[in-house]
Image (cartoon, rainbow, N blue to C red):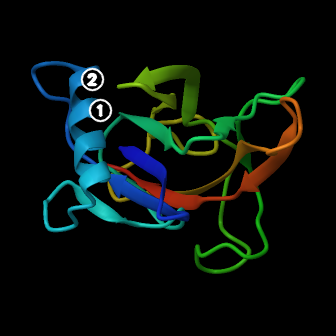
């Protein structure tokens, strides 16, 4: 899964893309999905939707890569804070029923800062686990919520800026029945 966060015509473009890792490897698959995201071609089967809400992982372990194609913005890794932090509750979640049925994160691990092409990215792995750390059973669905911290630089700030906390949510669903 690749979550693309870009700025086009002074507006945010957020889109979700998915493809199995190809024979040429993870990085090449991410590059291919990035090209599709930048072209904003929603007619291809890899397209999964727009916005930060309702991110969906289905069936098997996979990588989750967030690409930031936004000049003047960067992932914020403040003192003692990862740029991606999983939560257990969000009052305005799009997951039914509010507040979202979310268990402690036992699924997303191995967060690393990488590059996809020339763009900064965050990559983690979704191990498809429930709140007890056990593999998801057939058809079992678990919600997740996280904060994504992005720094926007000031024009006159000498390296300072404001940190945006974006709060996506979604689900992971175990193997098909």
Q: How many marks overall?
A: 2
For the view shown, which residue lies furthest in the left direction?
Answer: 23
Query: Is 15 drawn above or below residue 112 in the view shown?
Result: below
Residue drawn at the location 20% of the way across and 62% of the way down: 41
Disc ID at residue 57: none
- Dividing the picture into quadrants, the one containing residue 34 is top left
Mark 1 neighbour class, 10 Å CA radius: few under 14, some 14 to 19, many 20 or more:
many
Quadrant placement of the C terminus: bottom left
The image position of residue 98, as x and y in percent, is: 70, 79
Query: Is 131 drawn above or below residue 8 in the view shown?
Result: above
Residue that numbered label 2 is attached to: 26
Question: Is the Cβ of the residue at disc 2 closer than 8 Å to that at disc 1?
Answer: yes
Query: Is 27 drawn above or below residue 3 in the view shown?
Result: above
Q: Is residue 155 left or right of residue 123?
A: right
Residue drawn at the location 64% of the way across and 80% of the way down: 97
Quadrant placement of the N terminus: top left
The image position of residue 165, as x and y in percent, is: 76, 53
Q: Element under label 2?
A: helix
Residue that numbered label 1 is attached to: 30
| Residue placed most toward the observer, 31 or 128 | 31
């Amino acid at each position: 899964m690749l979550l693309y966060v870009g700025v086009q015509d002074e507006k945010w473009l957020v889109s979700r893309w998915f493809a199995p890792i190809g024979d040429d490897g993870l990085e090449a698959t991410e590059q291919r999905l990035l090209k599709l995201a930048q072209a904003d071609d929603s007619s291809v089967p890899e397209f999964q939707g727009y916005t930060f809400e309702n991110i969906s992982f289905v069936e098997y372990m996979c990588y989750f890569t967030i690409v930031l194609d936004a000049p003047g913005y960067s992932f914020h890794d403040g003192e003692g804070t990862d740029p991606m932090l999983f939560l257990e509750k969000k009052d305005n979640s799009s997951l039914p029923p509010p507040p979202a049925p979310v268990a402690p994160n036992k699924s997303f691990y191995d967060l690393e800062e990488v590059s996809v092409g020339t763009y900064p990215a965050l990559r983690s792995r979704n191990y498809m686990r429930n709140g007890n750390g056990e593999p998801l059973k057939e058809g079992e669905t678990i919600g997740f919520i996280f904060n994504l911290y992005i720094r926007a630089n000031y024009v006159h700030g000498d390296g300072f800026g404001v940190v945006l906390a974006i709060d996506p949510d979604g689900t992971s669903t175990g193997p098909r029945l």
